[in-house]
Image: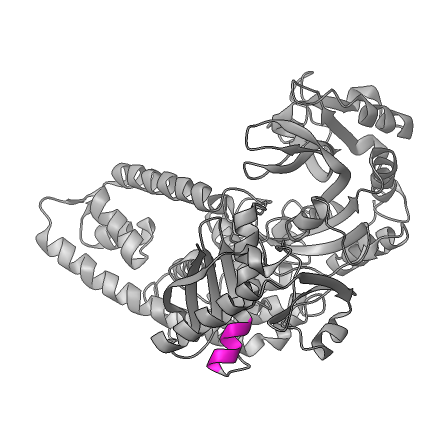
């Protein structure tokens, strides 16, 4: 097995698929451009959904990249050996080109060849789909693996729970997959398999064979094109190649953990109970740096992506304070910025936008740290007030949860402060309230961000098309070339569009913007799509998020003289199909960013 650094593994992956005639595409933004169903890009396939559904990709039908991803659904698991909120996914795709007989041998070659990862074939196990009423048993994949030298006793047939991918939402592309595992040779029983939780099998790669589209009625219909979508987690693979027990001991994290050691004056691993705190700090600050440094940079707020960022930053600050100990409620300097610089140093070559946006990252995190300090101070006053009215010697779960939810006090802080006063905390009641809160949050997230695939309905498509017209109208009416999209969320009911602007838009201006959009709709012009390089699009005056990395070729949508914009999402064929555009609300989204909500009627 080869011992590779993170930089070497990224390069090896891209070189391998380039040799298989794949176009190397850049990582998309962490904020999905045309997907209202998710807050973040959680997999390499998310930016490619329109192409998986049949649209031609400007770079062809064989693609590969290293994609930045964020997943926060299991944030409470961060701190174990493998969970991270930010991660990099090595991926490759076939858009209606090759399928199982090409992909599986390539996976085997990359895993076992001494030229690539050089993993001993005797350490590899695989699983395939066992079949059910929706799709047949995947004997084809099993036979390919067996021909490559994987013995039958290390080929496992598993059900949908383990060997079926997608759709992440209610509808969309999906299909059986074959997964590859490292076998550590410590099976818990003769029935041990990759479905077992004993830890003997660690997944390293997943090849998804997208053959079906799940309909709203729950039926699985054959896709008009068969796709391949694969994913290999960079951090987890490095853990195996570098022979360490945790992703936090790979070359990606060692400098960041060292920075945490420096600012807390503690040694990682010296105290068993503090290991998790080190890892949470390193993970959360790393993710925060990527969120703020993204070309569509996020700022802390109380909603959507900004809320997640705020939660991560404040959680990291709390754990720093806990490690520092005696300075629990007030560190005289800002140690978090030392860790921020370590993160940027690790990643600046792979993601130069972090270095380019370093000042903004530092300012944003510094400002949020100051706000949190004020919240903690307010919470301490609330704690004092609570104690003065307390009946008995126990702080209720309701009161301790309010301190957590409103002022950011972790339970441990409340317990510690209570102990100093000879008081107790009803931790069982707090746990019940926390569980209830998490369940409500999860249900809300499932309703609002249910899965990973965009809604390609006619109404959502029309509303997305309308955002192009509104974007151009904003620039024209507000007479400010710095008015640029900062994010959007589009459902079948309404569009929500965030844009950079330093003041509220007046009622008269909103009326003119509506008029501009509706004039474009009344003109009923054809919506034309052409492919060109990003430089050519810019020269033609196309609107685009030019901080983004673009493929060699991009799609540019033209709507008469009204709009010219780079985009990869679904569009109507004529502006006249949209209906009547009506702005329902204009408000502040965050500092320097305004938000418009609008509908088509």
Q: Is residue 152 above or below residue 267?
A: above
Taking the spot 36% from the left edge, 41% from the top edge, the residue there is 440
| Prevailing SS of the magenta stretch | helix
Instruction: Describe the colour scheme in one phrase.
Output: one colour
Give the camera-side residue of 301 and 87: 301
Taking the spot 83% from the left edge, 37% from the top edge, the residue there is 99
Count the labels in the image: 0
Where the C terminus falls, by quadrant? bottom left
Give coordinates of residue 364: x percent, y percent: 46, 72
Tell me, yes or no, if residue 309 can be seen here: no
Q: Is residue 446 above or below residue 346?
A: above
- Quadrant position of residue 452: top right
Q: Is residue 23 above or below residue 374?
A: above
Give coordinates of residue 179: x percent, y percent: 73, 33
Tell me, yes or no, if residue 428 can be seen here: yes
Q: Is residue 33 above or below residue 171?
A: below
Taking the spot 40% from the left edge, 77% from the top edge, the residue there is 509
Which segment did they paint magenta?
472-478
Give the camera-side residue of 238 and 479: 479
Q: Reply yes or no: does residue 477 show up in magenta.
A: yes
Where the N terminus falls, by quadrant? top right
Taking the spot 66% from the left edge, 73% from the top edge, the residue there is 542
Q: Reply yes or no: does residue 596 show up in magenta.
A: no
Give the camera-side residue of 299 and 233: 299
- Quadrant position of residue 357: bottom right
| Outermost residue toward the bottom in this view | 479
Give coordinates of residue 566: x percent, y percent: 66, 66
- Quadrant position of residue 186: top right
């Amino acid at each position: 097995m080869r011992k590779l650094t993170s930089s070497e593994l990224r390069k090896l992956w891209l070189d391998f698929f380039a040799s298989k005639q794949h176009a190397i595409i850049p990582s998309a933004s962490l904020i999905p451009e045309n997907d209202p169903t998710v807050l973040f890009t959680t997999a390499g396939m998310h930016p490619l959904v329109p192409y998986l559904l049949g649209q031609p990709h400007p770079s062809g039908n064989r693609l590969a990249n290293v994609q930045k991803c964020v997943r926060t659904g299991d944030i409470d698991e961060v701190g174990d050996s493998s969970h991270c909120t930010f991660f990099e996914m090595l991926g490759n795709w076939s858009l209606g080109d090759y399928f199982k007989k090409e992909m599986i041998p390539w996976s085997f070659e990359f895993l076992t060849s001494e030229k690539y990862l050089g993993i001993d074939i005797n350490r590899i196990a695989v699983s395939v789909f066992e079949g059910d009423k929706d799709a047949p048993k995947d004997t084809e994949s099993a036979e390919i693996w067996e021909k490559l030298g994987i013995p039958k006793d290390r080929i496992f047939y598993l059900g949908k729970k383990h060997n079926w991918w997608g759709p992440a939402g209610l509808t969309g592309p999906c299909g059986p997959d074959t997964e590859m595992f490292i076998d550590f040779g410590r099976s818990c029983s003769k029935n041990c398999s990759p479905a077992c939780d004993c830890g003997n099998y660690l997944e390293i790669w997943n090849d998804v064979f997208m053959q079906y589209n799940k309909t709203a009625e729950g039926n699985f219909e054959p896709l008009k094109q068969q796709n391949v979508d694969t994913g290999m987690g960079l951090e987890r693979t490095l853990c195996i190649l570098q022979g360490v027990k945790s992703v936090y001991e790979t070359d990606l994290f060692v400098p960041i953990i060292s920075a945490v050691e420096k600012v807390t004056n503690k040694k990682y691993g010296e105290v068993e109970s503090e290991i998790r705190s080190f890892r949470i700090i390193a993970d959360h600050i790393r993710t925060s740096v990527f969120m703020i440094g993204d070309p569509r940079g996020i700022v802390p707020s109380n909603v959507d992506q900004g809320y997640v960022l705020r939660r991560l930053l404040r959680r990291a600050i709390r754990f720093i304070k806990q490690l520092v100990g005696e300075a629990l409620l007030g560190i005289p300097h800002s140690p978090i910025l030392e860790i921020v610089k370590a993160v940027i140093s690790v990643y600046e070559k792979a993601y130069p936008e972090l270095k380019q946006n370093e000042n903004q990252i530092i300012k944003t995190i510094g400002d949020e740290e100051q706000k949190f300090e004020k919240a903690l101070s307010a919470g301490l006053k609330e704690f004092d007030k609570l104690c003065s009215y307390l009946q008995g010697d126990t702080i209720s779960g309701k009161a301790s949860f309010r301190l957590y939810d409103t002022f950011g006090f972790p339970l441990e802080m409340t317990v510690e402060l209570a102990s100093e006063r000879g008081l107790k905390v009803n931790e069982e009641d707090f746990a019940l309230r926390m569980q209830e809160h998490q369940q409500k949050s999860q249900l809300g997230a499932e309703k609002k961000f249910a899965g990973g695939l965009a809604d390609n309905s006619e109404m959502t498509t029309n509303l997305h098309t309308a955002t192009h017209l509104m974007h151009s109208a904003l620039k024209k009416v507000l007479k400010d070339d710095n008015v640029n999209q900062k994010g959007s969320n589009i459902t079948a009911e309404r569009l929500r569009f965030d844009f950079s602007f330093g003041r509220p838009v007046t009622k008269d201006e909103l009326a003119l913007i509506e008029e501009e959009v509706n004039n474009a709709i009344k003109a009923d012009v054809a919506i034309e799509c052409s492919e060109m390089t990003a430089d050519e699009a810019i020269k033609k005056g196309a609107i685009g998020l030019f901080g983004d990395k673009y493929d060699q070729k991009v799609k540019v949508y033209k709507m008469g003289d009204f709009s010219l914009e780079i985009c990869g999402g679904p569009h109507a064929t004529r502006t006249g199909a949209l209906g009547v555009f009506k702005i329902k609300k204009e408000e502040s989204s965050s500092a320097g960013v305004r938000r418009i909500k609008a509908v088509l009627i």
